[in-house]
Image (cartoon, grey):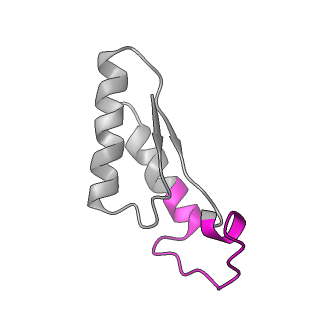
Amino acid sequence: MLALGFFDGVHLGHQELINLAKRIAIQQDLKLAVMTFFPHPKQIIGNDQTPQTYITPLEQKAKIMQDLGEKP
């Protein structure tokens, strides 16, 4: 099961989406993976070099996602 998104702030809505993917993965006996992007895709695909402000720094985002993926 893959939850895919930019997850800019890993706010409650993002956390619920990841938790939903986690519940589905558990029900279907699948592994859970979360894929995010850094830097923002518009800086790569759109060639937009405007400095991007991130709500949650990358290291903190990784820690939050790791905690969300831990077994209950």
Q: Is residue 57 magenta?
A: yes
Q: What residue do we see at 39% from left, 14% from top?
A: 29
Residue at the top extreme of this rendering = 29
**At x 59% / y 80%, what residue is drawn?**
52
Residue 61 belongs to magenta span:
yes
- Residue depicted at x 27% and y 57%: 13
**Of the pair 39 and 11, the residue shown nearer to us:** 39
Residue at the far front in the pictured view:
46
Q: Is residue 3 above or below residue 46?
A: above
User: Is 70 on the left or on the right of 51, as rendered?
Assistant: left
The residue shown at (34%, 15%) is: 28
Q: Position of residue 61 (x, y in %)?
A: 50, 60
Can see residue 40? no
Which corner quadrant holds the C terminus?
Answer: top left
The image position of residue 34, as x and y in percent, is 50, 42
Magenta segment: 42-62
Q: Assign the magenta stretch its main secondary structure.
A: loop
52 relative to 42, above or below: below
Q: Position of residue 68 (x, y in %)?
A: 38, 44
Location of the N terminus by quadrant is top left
Does 67 sit left or right of 39 as displayed? left
32 vs 70, nearest the viewer:
32
Residue 4 locus on image (x, y percent)? 48, 45
Comparing 22 with 43, the one in front is 43
Q: For residue 50, which quarter of the picture?
A: bottom right
Say whether residue 42 is visible.
yes
The image quarter containing residue 25 is top left
